[in-house]
Image (spheres, helix red, strand yellow):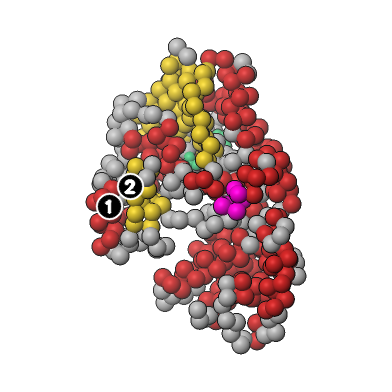
């Protein structure tokens, strides 16, 4: 691989904004990719993937490069040279990269790779929490899987097109895909490409949605004509899926505490051709109270640590704090206690997270079922999705039924 100076400089700029200015990696990459309109898909891919890689391996690379906060430009270039050496890329003879100690880098890598928190490049607290919560064996496998780059998975919008037709449509744009057993609407890209510029995307024929996330809406067993509430809808990845499973019939109410996220959902719903839905921002407890006893189905896709989706958000390894996890666990239980009241007798709810920690998942459900509010509910089934087993994001979902 031949390195181009302006692309490498863009990576260094991006790392500076992410590591020194605390900006979010996805936003920074969007910003940096706007630097030069002439960059082609390969150039853009290089910038995005190299930046994400160095963010993912930050702790390992900073140990090897003996770099530390705040990262000066020479430090950031040192991280970049570690990336090059470990990938076997020839270092160009640029002033910023001179005197790269290649043998020393490889030696340090071999030493540090013996220790999980360095090898997997995670903070001490996360390694301790993962081991305590999942046990040494599962955590070791799981964190290794969560450090792999995520595949790009599409969900066919079956309101508009069949999966095989979509595959043929995308092939015309030289986007080759394959089906995935056990994920009826999913297509996996054989090669990473920008799908957002395709006509198929603009026409709402698919959404980008991880395969594990595609398991959640079917777990709720919705039927056309029902009243379904998606109480933590966000920008609506799962709302859109629920709507297509309802065949656009019935009533779908999408709630969230952030109006801004619901606005994004409206745009996506329009593109997807969905009209059986409405959004309501939760700006007071009245919004929930008004819906008490009204839903046939209820999705609680609760806010969580996001430890199951580190492959797609590697910078959350450095942004997440243990105090946040403690706080969000309180919110998760409040959501179960208060929002479950929106369900009708005989109705069903799914509690889901994109976490792999039992304390955010099965233990929350057990605590709810043992509480006063949980007495009317019956546990039906649960599913723990591990990245190390599925090859996709880590997720949890539990189905509960409200007794008649
Ligand atoms: C896991 S995300 C939802 C992802 C979304 N369902 C999807 O499939 O794209 C959790 C959502 O819960 C929202 N949230 C946080 N606290 C909440 C609360 N107390 N009530 C309702 N929603 C909440 C967040 O704004 C966030 O959008």
Quick check: 77 left or right of 267?
right
Q: Nearer the viewer, residue 384 or 245?
A: 384
Q: Which residue is mark 1?
A: 166
Q: Is residue 44 above or below residue 384?
A: below
Residue 202 at x, y = what percent? 32, 55
Say how many tags the image has: 2
First-in-chain label (1 vs 2): 2
Q: Quadrant of residue 96?
A: bottom right
Q: Which residues are magenta?
A: 141-146
Q: Cβ(mark 2) to ligand 1 < 8 Å?
A: no
Q: CA distance from mark 1 to mark 2?
A: 7 Å
Residue 107 at x, y = what percent? 71, 72
Q: Regarding mark 2 in the picture, which secondary structure is present there?
A: strand
The answer to whether the residue labelled 1 contacts the one labelled 2, judged by CB atoms less than 8 Å apart, is yes
Residue at 31% across, 26% down: 225
Q: Cβ(mark 1) to ligand 1 < 8 Å?
A: no
């Amino acid at each position: 691989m031949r390195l181009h100076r302006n692309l490498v400089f863009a990576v260094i700029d991006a790392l500076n904004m992410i590591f020194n200015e605390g900006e979010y990696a996805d936003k920074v990459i969007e910003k940096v990719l706007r630097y030069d309109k002439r960059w082609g898909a390969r150039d853009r891919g290089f910038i995005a993937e190299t930046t994400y890689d160095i963010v993912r391996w930050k702790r390992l690379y900073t140990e090897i490069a003996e770099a530390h906060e705040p990262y000066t430009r020479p430090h950031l270039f040192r991280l970049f040279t570690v990336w090059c050496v470990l990938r076997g890329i020839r270092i160009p003879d640029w002033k910023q990269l001179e005197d790269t100690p290649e043998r020393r880098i490889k030696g340090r890598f071999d030493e540090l790779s013996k220790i999980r928190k360095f090898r997997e490049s995670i903070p001490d607290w996360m390694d301790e929490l993962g081991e305590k919560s999942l046990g040494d064996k599962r955590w070791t496998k799981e964190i290794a899987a969560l450090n792999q780059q995520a595949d790009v998975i599409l969900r066919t919008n079956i309101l508009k097109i069949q999966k095989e037709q979509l595959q043929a449509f995308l092939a015309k744009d030289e986007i080759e895909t394959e089906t995935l057993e056990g994920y009826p609407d999913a297509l996996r890209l054989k090669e990473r490409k920008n799908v957002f510029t395709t006509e198929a995307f603009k026409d709402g024929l698919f959404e980008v949605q991880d395969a594990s996330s595609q398991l959640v809406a079917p777990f709720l067993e919705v039927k056309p004509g029902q009243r379904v509430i998606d109480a933590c809808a966000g920008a609506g990845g799962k709302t859109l899926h629920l709507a297509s499973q309802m065949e656009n019939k019935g009533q779908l109410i999408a709630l969230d505490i952030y109006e801004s996220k619901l606005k994004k959902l409206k745009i996506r719903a329009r593109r997807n051709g969905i009209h059986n839905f409405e959004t309501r921002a939760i700006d007071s407890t009245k919004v929930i109270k008004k819906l008490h006893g009204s839903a046939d189905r209820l999705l609680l896709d609760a806010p969580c640590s996001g430890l199951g989706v580190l492959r797609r958000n590697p910078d959350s390894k450095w942004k997440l704090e243990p105090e946040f996890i403690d706080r969000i666990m309180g919110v998760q239980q409040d959501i179960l206690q208060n929002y479950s009241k929106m369900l009708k007798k005989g109705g069903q709810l799914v509690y889901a997270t994109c976490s792999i920690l039992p304390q955010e998942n099965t233990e929350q459900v057990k605590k709810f079922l043992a509480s006063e509010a949980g007495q009317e509910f019956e546990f039906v089934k649960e599913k723990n999705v591990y990245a190390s087993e599925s090859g996709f994001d880590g997720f949890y979902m539990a189905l509960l039924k409200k007794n008649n």
